[in-house]
Amino acid sequence: MLASGSCKTRLLCSARELLQIIHDLENGLGDNERWTNNVHSVFVYSGDDLNALQELAKSLVPEAEVTVLGPGDAETAECRVSNEFDDFCGVMAGINVNRFIFNADVYLLSNTNGNSIPIISSGAGVLFLKVEYQGVPVFLSTFNDIIDIDTGNIIEGKETIEQAGERIFEHVIKVASGEIEVSAVRHGQDDFIPWKRGVSL
């Protein structure tokens, strides 16, 4: 999904999709100058592909490793929001959440030294971090089920914008009728937003 700003584009995609973009850029199939000049930032969610998350983490931070916490471990983990990135985290900077509840597997990144900045961490790993790829800030979320509708098929050429729009419309109707639950409800999350409202990337 692309969101255009005044001059540059903000990209929202899964780990698998960013891996494909990086592969294309590094193998001469993409336009590196266009990437650097036209992409403002990238927000990446892991999706349901653990292998893609592991490969992407290694591409961005070579020493990184991914650990999987089961729901029981995740329920007792403490979350910390960094106080070293105030312009991004805003009023949430520096807070600790004593009980982190998540009813599914949680992915943690470890060994994320170098050019990465941990934004949200828990125990021995990082849940959300900032890293740069060819001068473009990449915000990587390891949560595997935070996106209810993935339109990455458009980027991959497997679906048109119109087809994705129809799928989104049908999904909204199913949610409104109670046929399906959004991921936050399904996992019993009362989400908080660790950054300022509005565009702040």
Image: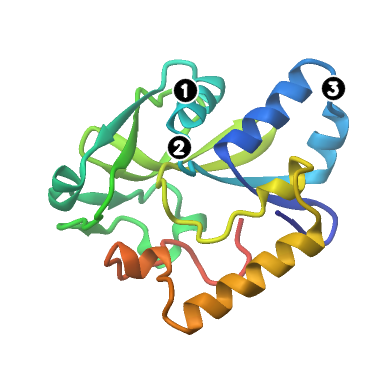
* Quadrant location, the C terminus: bottom right
Residue at the (34%, 70%) spot, across then down: 185
Numbered mark located on residue 114 in the image: 1
Residue at the (45%, 63%) spot, across then down: 90
The residue lying toward the viewer, choosing from 57 and 14, is 14
Q: Secondary structure at mark 1?
A: loop
Residue at the (44%, 58%) spot, across then down: 89
Residue beneath disc 3: 29
Left or right of 37? Residue 137 is left
| Label 3 vs label 1, nearer the camera | 3
User: Is any atom of residue 5 visible in this view?
Assistant: no
Numbered mark located on residue 19 in the image: none
Residue beneath disc 2: 117
Q: How many marks?
A: 3
Measured as percent of width and height from the top left, residue 146 is found at: 44, 56
Q: Are marks 3 and 2 in contact (CB under 8 Å)?
A: no
User: What type is the residue that disc 1 sits on?
Assistant: Gly
| Label 3 vs label 2, nearer the camera | 3
Measured as percent of width and height from the top left, residue 13 is found at: 62, 46
